[in-house]
Structure formats: C-alpha cells, structure tokens
Image (cartoon, helix red, strand yellow):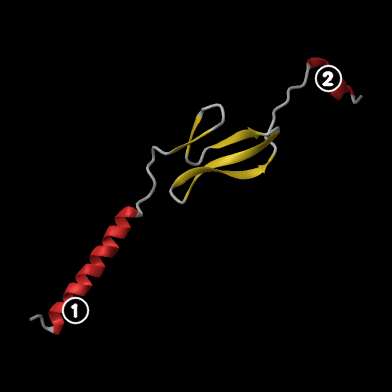
Amino acid sequence: MMDGRTVLWSMTAAVAFLFAAEATMAAPPDHGCTCRNRDGSKYELGQVACLRVDGSAYLARCEMNLNVTTWKKLREGCPTAGMSTPSRLALQSVGL
C-alpha cells in the first residue's frame, strides 16, 4: 500500500509532466510559415503587402493567429508612387 508522501509525489510528477508536454506543444511557430496572396505569391511572417479583394485594396501584414497564418489589415488603400513628367516639373518651377 502507498503512503501519503508517495501519492503526493506521484501526483506532483504527473502535473509537472503535463505542464512540460503543454509547453512543447505551445512552441513558437515554424519560421517556414508563410502567407499567400491571391496570385499565389508567398510572404514571410511580418512582411507587408497590398491585397486586392473584391474591387478594393488594402495594406496587410502576414501574421500568426491561433497557429494559423493570416493577413492582418493595417489600413485601407495601398501606397502609390507617382512620377512627374518634365513638362509638369517646368510648370511647377515657374509657379503655374
């Protein structure tokens, strides 16, 4: 028959084992995880992309949520770059 100390030690060991097993299951995500855009291009965790869905565009970052990669919307619209033509630059410098 087991005495109280043996039972207590066995229960403590079992709880410690369960905590250790849970800690290994909750490991950080694999660095090979990626998000995919609709065109099939891959993005690493933390990368930002312009996504176009149903006629609208928005800026999103590839993130991990509940052990699944997902896009987190950062803001509406996407940044654009413009280039002035030489004639437009001349008009700006003259003040027109």
The structure residue drawn at horizontal position 61% and vertical position 44%, both measured from the top left corner, is 73
What amino acid type should be assigned to the residue bearing mark 1?
Leu
Name which quarter of the figure residue 8 lies in.
bottom left
Name which quarter of the figure residue 7 lies in.
bottom left
Judging from the image, what secondary structure is the residue with disc 1 in?
A: helix
Task: Indicate whether 82 appears above or below 62.
Answer: above
Q: Which residue is nearer to you in this view: 80 or 68?
A: 68
What amino acid type should be assigned to the residue bearing mark 2?
Arg
User: Which residue is the site of mark 2?
Assistant: 88
Q: Which residue is nearer to you in this view: 83 or 79?
A: 79
Give coordinates of residue 66: x percent, y percent: 46, 51
| Residue most extreme to the left | 1
Q: Quick one: quadrant of the N terminus?
A: bottom left
Judging from the image, what secondary structure is the residue with disc 2 in?
A: helix
Name which quarter of the figure residue 4 lies in.
bottom left
Give coordinates of residue 29: x percent, y percent: 39, 46
The structure residue drawn at horizontal position 62% and vertical position 34%, both measured from the top left corner, is 50
Q: Is residue 57 left or right of residue 96?
A: left
| Residue most extreme to the top | 87
Give coordinates of residue 93: x percent, y percent: 85, 23
Q: Of circles 2 and 1, which is in front? A: 1
Residue 80: image tag: none
How many residues crowd around disc 1 within 10 Å: few (fewer than 14), some, or many (20 or more)? few
Residue 8: image tag: 1
| Residue most extreme to the front | 1
* C-alpha gap between disc 2 and disc 1: 84 Å
Task: Indicate whether 7 appears above or below 56.
Answer: below
Task: Indicate whether 36 appears above or below 85.
Answer: below
The structure residue drawn at horizontal position 78% and vertical position 17%, both measured from the top left corner, is 85
Q: Earlier in the sequence, mark 2 or mark 1?
A: 1
